[in-house]
Amino acid sequence: MEKDHPKTIMILLSIASVILTIWNIWFFCAQITIYESSIQAKVATYPEKIIPTFYGPGRTQQHKEHIILASFPLRVKDHIFQGQKGLFFPISNEDERPGSIQAIVFEITINSEDSSVYVRLKTVEPLHSRIPIPAETKGLIKLVVDHITPFDFVLMKIKKSTL
């Protein structure tokens, strides 16, 4: 007991308090993105458009624009809206996913006969993109549906497990 120094204990308690504080900030404030995945998606046969994007006086950059057709289950119809951001993951012939391309919803059609929601999205990517997407390329769309904290996510899982 005589060899124990309160300095060592105080340093360890301070480090533990800082770690616990950082973890609490993350747990209650961080944002987790919730996505809804499409049943299927493919690039339309329409030719890609080359469009200019203006970045200020005299500064433009050219971008490619593709149209993507996607279908979602009917249960997510209330979570899809125009202007919503999403990601398109093209699948190549080798069943690889080379990356994702940002897309924006611009048209929504609900078909209650086959319980689907059909969505048309536009992609806007740099002219010399590293991900080629020719017409009829199949893939997957993930739309950003919500942002929740880890705390809310844990509460949601607990509620689902008790039902």
Image (cartoon, grey):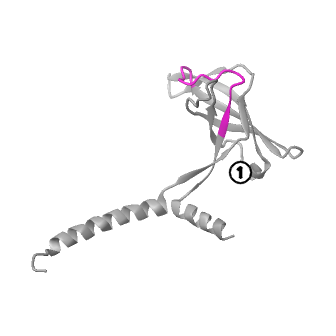
Residue 72, by quadrant, is top right
Which residue sits at x=21%, y=72%? 9
Q: Nearer the viewer, residue 122 or 2?
A: 2
132 in magenta: yes
Which residue sits at x=21%, y=67%? 11
Residue assigned mark 1: 79
Dominant secondary structure of the magenta stretch? loop
In the structure shown, which secondary structural element does the residue marked by tag 1 occupy? helix
Which residue sits at x=63%, y=35%? 103
Q: How many marks?
A: 1
Amino acid type shown at disc 1: His
**Is residue 151 depicted above or below 4 in this figure?**
above
Which quarter of the rendering shows the N terminus?
bottom left
Direction left: furthest residue: 2
Which quarter of the rendering shows the C terminus?
bottom right
Magenta part of the protein: which range?
Answer: 126-141
Which residue sits at x=75%, y=52%? 78
The location of residue 30, given as percent across then percent down, is: 48, 56
The location of residue 144, given as percent across then percent down, is: 62, 46
Would you say 17 lies left or right of 46 here? left
Residue 86, by quadrant, is top right
Q: Residues within 10 Å of mark 1 (few under 14, many from 20)?
A: few
Q: Nearer the viewer, residue 56 or 99?
A: 99
Q: Nearer the viewer, residue 52 or 7?
A: 7
